[in-house]
Image (cartoon, rainbow, N blue to C red):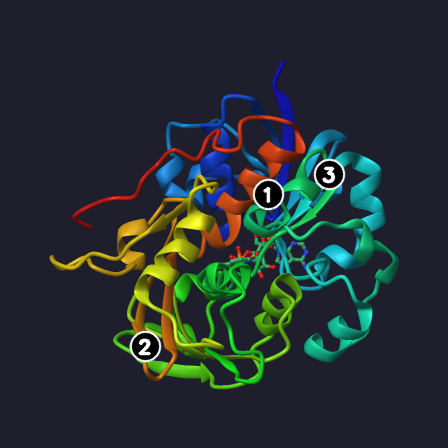
Amino acid sequence: MSVRVSIVGASGYAGGELLRLLLDHPEVEVGQVTSERHAGKYVHTVHPNLRGRTRLTFAPSAQLEPCEVLCLCLPHGAAQERIDAFAALAERIVDLSADFRLRDPARYARWYGEEHRAPAWLERFVYGLPETRREELRGARYVSGVGCNATASTLALLPLVRAGLLDPDLPVVVDLKVGSSEGGNKSSAASHHPERSGVVRTFAPTSHRHTAEIEQELGLTNVHLTVTSVEAVRGALATVHAWTREVVAEKDLWRAYRGVAKDEPFLRIVKDRTGIHRFPEPKLLAGSNYADVGFALEPEARRVVSLCAIDNLVKGAAGSAVQCLNLMLGWEETLGLGFPGLHPI
Ligand SMILES: NC(=O)c1ccc[n+]([C@@H]2O[C@H](COP(=O)([O-])OP(=O)(O)OC[C@H]3O[C@@H](n4cnc5c(N)ncnc54)[C@H](OP(=O)(O)O)[C@@H]3O)[C@@H](O)[C@H]2O)c1
């Protein structure tokens, strides 16, 4: 018996990617897919890669019917406004937006500049990153999505935090390079092709909202992000600059990174001495749920550069959501997520 999953906001980039993954999931039957703008149209008119893979048409969200799992892929703020109505339709919810990622309403208000409209729901959601919340995700009913930049940053930092290597008195600086699909499918002046093409444009030098998620998941208070748009459609690369509390050797870092990666089906260490692909690269991960992590060390300076590459729409959104769904329903965690990416691309 398949589990019936419906997707709200399925015409968007995250929703489309989730649909692509769920159509190939052996335990899932996709129920309804919603879009207001494209109601009545075949899915492939918006997601041309899905032509011939489904005969589904978009329905308006007012016509949503009960299902077992509802995945919400709406812009920020839309899920919290209607969470009671969504919860009445489905036993389980996965919300990919930022609405339910933070547990503390005060932290939400600080980072999002407004009061949360359904604060009682915050503590009912589990943050949807299996690498930090696996046990809570097993059997969970309400799961949030993850921020794409937060995911790359958190996974780059996780080995250093778990091994207790960071100097607590020094900041952690994360430089992120990101592709254009992070902005969703609505065009803006910044996404207009002549303005976006070829850019190296820092749009968030300080105070990026995903800082809150990273600090929440890692128990840190000194994380500082800078985010720069680069010439790519998919992909995010987090370059963490961090300092260790003591002088460490490279073998200590190997132990820390292997200690985390050995139990993680989608974390791979990329650190080779030779060749051109010595460190993580987002381009190779397009369409894949892998997060590639790597590092380099300046021992005397106690400086570690830790890298994590992901596809923002997969490990940074829809893929992590499917990984969570697998945990929520007690399935093999990797189901439906086998695609390794492409090379060359
Ligand atoms: N893009 C990423 O890399 C990424 C990564 C992680 C998380 N996320 C999160 O995922 C969510 C979706 O992002 P996206 O990039 O897929 O955005 P998007 O491409 O702009 O898609 C948004 C979807 O929501 C629908 N929608 C828009 N306004 C709505 C409203 N007021 N009520 C109901 N439906 C509405 C749109 O469809 P119609 O207008 O056709 O109804 C569209 O299908 C966001 O919350 C984002 O933060 C995105």
Percent x, y of residue 13: 48, 52
Q: Is residue 260 above or below residue 217?
A: above
Quick one: 315 or 188, which is closer to the camera? Answer: 315
CB of mark 1 near ligand 1 (< 8 Å) = yes
Residue at 65 percent of width and 67 percent of height? 219
**Number of numbered discs:** 3
Horizontal arrangement in the rendering, residue 224 relative to residue 83 (left or right) = left
Horizontal arrangement in the rendering, residue 119 relative to residue 49 (left or right) = right
Callout 2: helix, strand or loop?
Answer: loop
Quick one: 204 or 246, which is closer to the camera? Answer: 246
Label drawn at residue 39: 1
Q: Earlier in the sequence, mark 2 or mark 3?
A: 3
Q: Which mark's residue is nearer the viewer, 1 or 3? A: 3
Q: Is residue 231 above or below residue 288?
A: below
- Quick check: can you spot residue 37? no
In the image, what residue type sits under mark 1?
A: Ala
Label drawn at residue 140: 3
Quarter of the image where one finds residue 192 = bottom left
Quick one: 230 or 126, which is closer to the camera? Answer: 126
